[in-house]
Image: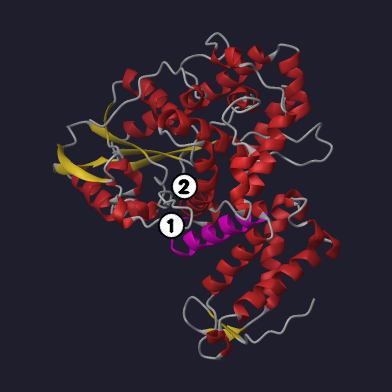
Amino acid sequence: MAVQNRIRKVRKRDRSLVAFDQGRIIHAILRAVQSVGGFSLDHVPGVNERLFSYGDDEHIAEFLSDVVVATLNRDQRHWIANFPPTVEEIQDTVVHVLRSFGFVTVADAYECWRWGKYWVRAGAITMDEFVGNGYPVPLHHETLAWNREHGCDTVAGLNEIVRLGHLPELVAAATERYERSVDEAATAVLARAATGDLRVIWVSGPSSSGKTTTTVKLLQRLRKEGLEFLMLNLDDYFWPLVEHPTDWLNDRNFETPEALDIQTINRHLRALLDGQAIQKPIYSFKEGRRVGTKLVRLKEGQLLLLDCLHGLYPPLTTGIAREAMFWLYIEAANMLYEGDGTSERLTQFTDVRLLRRMLRDVKHRNHPPLQTLLHWHYVRSGELFSIIPLMGLADHVVNGGMPFDLPVLKPFFLPDGIWPKPEEVAPYDTFLDARIRYRRIGSLLGQVAGLTLWEAEDHALIPGDHLVREFIGGTTLQIPHNE
């Protein structure tokens, strides 16, 4: 489909003007598409199936690039040679078009690549630390090989394990693998601490990857070796609610790093490391504002330990020497193919994290599941900007994804659990991101052989100190608070 193009130039990041080349848009889209295995991964009946009549991935990419051009043409300023669209405006439009046609996975890959290259240009990461579309190949290959060895690399295989009563063996094996990874993290921290340079440990990673439990387990190991810590609750640095405007759903974006007072956090961290006392804010989430302060000082020999979504975000650590910090990254990757694996379509890691967060939000934040579903686009936007593209900075990665997540989570959602009813979701049918995730996850849950609630709550099957208990409840771990 040919479109009229009135755009002749593009403003580069150094403000110079170059000729507009639609082919670059097609290439960028195709690169994202190929990195996730094709547009077919995002085929959604009733949403974008007609686009597949255009033919192969290249022809679909060409059509989408035409829509990008048509969208850019709507701003008449772009018709003037000296006021063309910027590179960032074009990239924003590509993301908008991809998501508007339901290509969520492709859009995620495009965004992660986009922001990763942004951080490379900013000098925050090197090309060796660049993670491309956000799927770390070595970790995923290792996870897939482990799952194949244990017969849980497909939904069909996982269902067979559940039906034959072999889930306890899988839980034990997966737990041993996870605990060994935490052991390795502790060993790496101790090695760094022995140099005398280590001052700060960051535990970072995307939402509901298992940071809290992993932080507690790491603390247990390190304290046994004589290390002492000061933990700061960075949630106390949220801006007041009046500075978080609501959107059309009456929702607020707390998932961006700038929802926190980054400059004050950085200033306080540097002051603590210099031996000074700080007046740390105390934030009331009930009132939506800071209600006081608390005097905090780092004692002699103590290390700072910070559990923070955005711990890798460069402005947080400006002025702090790299050798003084250890970054632990918690991923939640589990390589699980749909059905019997013949389709070669992987289930989405983000869907499991969304289920985990829904359950946690219900249990601990009194948020209805539908609210979490409608909010998830903010979660993804934040982590694709300042979390996942920066994972290459991590000194150690722990995989908090479990091969038995879905069977354990299912009884809390279906058939009589907290999964939103179709009539609850119906008023938001035009909210395409939520609609696609709702249909995809609902279909996946329907294919999984779940446990009973009694089985999921049984500590003989899933120990009380297990990472999954952070979400399904029943944890026996003591969660530390701010000191």
- Residue found at x 56% / y 86%: 76
Between 444 and 460, which is closer to the camera in this rendering? 444
Q: Earlier in the sequence, mark 2 or mark 1?
A: 1
Q: Quadrant of residue 78?
A: bottom right
Quadrant of the image containing the C terminus = top left
Between 186 and 409, which is closer to the camera in this rendering? 409
Q: Position of residue 262 (x, y in %)?
A: 31, 53
Q: Position of residue 400 (x, y in %)?
A: 54, 31
Question: In the image, is residue 92 above or below residue 185?
Answer: below
What predominant SS class does the magenta segment belong to?
Answer: helix
- Residue found at x 71% / y 17%: 162
Which stretch appears magenta? 106-125
Q: Amino acid at mark 1?
A: Ala
Structural crowding at the residue carrying mark 1, measured as other residues with C-alpha within 10 Å and reported as few (<14), some (14–19) or many (≥20):
some
Q: Which residue is mark 1?
A: 124
Q: Amino acid at mark 2?
A: Leu
Residue 480 in sight? yes
User: Per the image, is 19 magenta?
Assistant: no
Q: Position of residue 436 (x, y in %)?
A: 66, 48
Instruction: Kindly check if marks 2 and 1 are in contact, taking CB atoms under 8 A apart as contact.
Output: yes
Question: In the image, is residue 261 above or below residue 472?
Answer: below
Real-space Cα distance between discs 2 and 1? Answer: 9 Å
Left or right relative to 44: residue 402: left
Q: Which residue is mark 2?
A: 393
Quadrant of the image containing the N terminus = bottom right
- Residue found at x 13% / y 41%: 277
Secondary structure category for the residue under label 2: helix
